[in-house]
Amino acid sequence: MNKKIQINTAYLYILPAFLIMGGIIVYPVIELIIGSFMTVTGGKEVFAALRNYRLAFKDPLLWTALQNNLKLFLCVPVMTVLSLVIAVILFNRIAGWRFYRSIIFLPFILAIPVVGIIFTYILQMNGVLNTTLRNLGLDMLAIDWLGSPTLALPSVGAVIIWKQLGFGVVLFLARLMSIDISLYEAAEVDGATWLQKFFQVTVPQAAAVIEFYVIISLIDMLSWVFSFIFVMTAGGPGNRTTVLEFLIYKKSFGGGDFNIAMAISAVVLVMATILIIIHQSLLGRREEMSE
Amino acid sequence: MRKLLSILLFTAMLLTLAACGGDKSSGEKYTLTVWYWGEQECPGYKAYMEEIVQRYQKKYPNVTVDAVLQESDTLYSAFRTAESAGEGPDVQFLWGGTLDLEDAWLGNLVPVSDYITSEQMADIASSSLAETNWDGKQWGIPAYQIAFGVAYNKKMFADAGLDPENPYETWDEFIACCEALKKAGHTPLGFGLKDGWLPGWFAFYLAQQNLDSVNDLITCIRGDAKYTDPKYSEWLEKVKELVDKGYVNNDIQSLDFYQGQQLLENEQAAMTFHAHPYAVQLEKTMGSDTIGFARPPVYGKGKLATAIAAPCQIYTIPKSAKHKEGAAQFILFLHEEDNLKLLYEKANALMPNMKFKSEWLTSEVDKKVTSWLKEYKNMCYQYYYPPMFEYEGLVPVVQKMFSENLSPADAAKELDAVFDKWREQNPEQLDAFKKWSVPE
């Protein structure tokens, strides 16, 4: 009897959190999924089966947006390698490493619109970067970074890398600081070089954190880049930087169909869920191996 | 029988009295929420609205007006989000034409004609009411009327050897002006394309010129004509001509629309597109000897070749409005003569209302615009196509013409494909268009 009361009490304690989670996560997701199968006729929502999904997948804009998201995935290996290298350099306690750590982390805490606006002024045709290049006599390098169809997305990607790098550095540095120092000492006794220590000790020891960072960053590139695009390029020029989130926004509020936007949102949700499942299965396998 | 008739008449009288007496606007205290816009194209509109709120609260002491200025980028998204949650304002400002009717078709609005009688609308110009009249109902009441034209720097024109008072009429003369300005070392046109507002403006300056009536465009939207027909797409060749001849600022892709317009006031470009109230502001700040205002150049052969875009922005009543009668009363209040005068004094905006007096006009730009309104037809192209055509068609297509050298023929094909997509994705709106016939 006492055990039953204990269990019920435990459930009672988690009930508020459960209700809040249900209200802010589960309910909107259910509404989204239901809405993705509906359409508005005569001012009323009616069941439309797979209509919205069919129209969404038929729309070339969806594939353009998806391609742009996948191109942004290329930022992830760059961010990961750079973060890891910088973390290792800081871990070697170079002079002023705490200061550098703060400086590198600073962009991460800045609001995205602020970063977007600043970089827009830097990267526009007659912006700070091009003016500097022209003053240095490098006119041919003064390009419309955000207005060029080939350079707009890489430019946004570079800004995302700049902003997100700090998170990876701090994450990896924290992991490096918790690695058993004797592993490095043993490697040094065996005559390992800096690179050998990096690949044979650091990377394997930080593998779980790297995995976590990669998956989180991929999810970010899929469902968290809207603000950068909205502020810096508005999806242009000519849809060259339109990503799935921006497409959802345009479909919802730019004269499109709200229910088709919901169907595209459901697609993004499924893709993000797949990434989370991959992460969870990797985590589970790692835990099994360590046991 | 007579007794029965008396009882029926008495009941009808009681119901009428109850309807009048039950109007919340007449006594009960409440807050009327107004979400408005306009400062962006009519500088001074915010000050006008603040004064209106004071006047309204003085006249109706039971009402507190909470007027909130909206941003351009979020005017529709904020409204639609609020409306989908049943938390919309009592009075909502929207852009006119399909930019209003789409929300009517989405079920976000109630007809204002359910709350405002045709007698109460009698002073408002029927051509302006027609922009938001659909299915026999009125879905919006003008907030103000603006005319669109080309604002230009007279001094730069004189410097290029051009006549600042009579700059051009036809497209060829316009191109000659651009060439002369370029030769004199001035950037002929200052535009910003990044945020996507400019393509819609290009369309309502140029795209209607081969049409004989609004219904020609509606025919194409319905799918009974192809957009690749030069009648509809010749204007794209004109845009391409501007690109090819280098008459536009080199950072057009980097700048937002308003930043492009500012090139004129910063004297970095000789011409730009402007709504007339803003041109009036420039006339006041830079002087009428510096700022001129001209009609779009004419190239077309249709009856609408010389038409100017003089659309109305409008006030609507959302479906979720808690005080619909109060909303109607507020909207009508804006059309009282003193308030029309206030609108002009504060925001330089016109109102297509017979009570609006031409003797109030003080600026040369306003006088020119009112003479255009008398002389030429009024047609705002943007008000008659589905908004999706702009966001998924005009915006990327015109951007590609500037950034990727997209040809006018390919641009027309892409725009035609957007209409195909719109028809497939929006069968209900297509039905609405099939029902729509704009009075000539």
Image (tube, coloured by chain):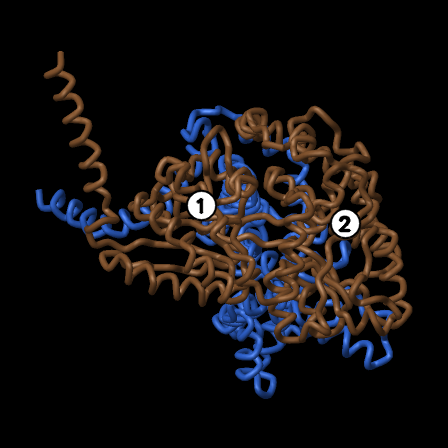
Residue A227 vs A106, above or below: the answer is above
Q: Which image quarter holds the C terminus of chain B?
A: top right
Residue at left offset 43%, top offset 35%: B107
Q: Is residue B27 above or below residue A118?
A: above
Q: Name which quarter of the figure residue A117 lies in.
A: bottom right
- The numbered mark, 2 or 1, whose residue comes first in the sequence reads 1
Give the residue drawn at x 64%, y 27%: B222
Q: How busy is the neighbourhood of tag 1: few (under 14 within 10 Å), some, or many (20 plus)?
A: many
Q: Amino acid at mark 1?
A: Arg
- The answer to whether the residue labelled 2 contacts the one labelled 1, judged by CB atoms less than 8 Å apart, is no
Q: Secondary structure at mark 2?
A: helix
CA separation in Å, label 2 and label 1: 30 Å
Amino acid bearing label 2: Lys
**Of B186 and B286, which appears nearest the observer?**
B286
Position in image of residue A26 (x %, y %): 36, 43
Q: Colour of chain A?
A: blue
Residue highlighted by disc 1: B80
Instruction: Identify the chain drawn in brown.
Output: B
Quadrant in which residue B122 is drawn? top left
- The circle on residue B400 is 2
The image position of residue B91, as x and y in percent, is 38, 49
Residue extending farthest left: A1
- Camera-side residue: A67 or A169? A67
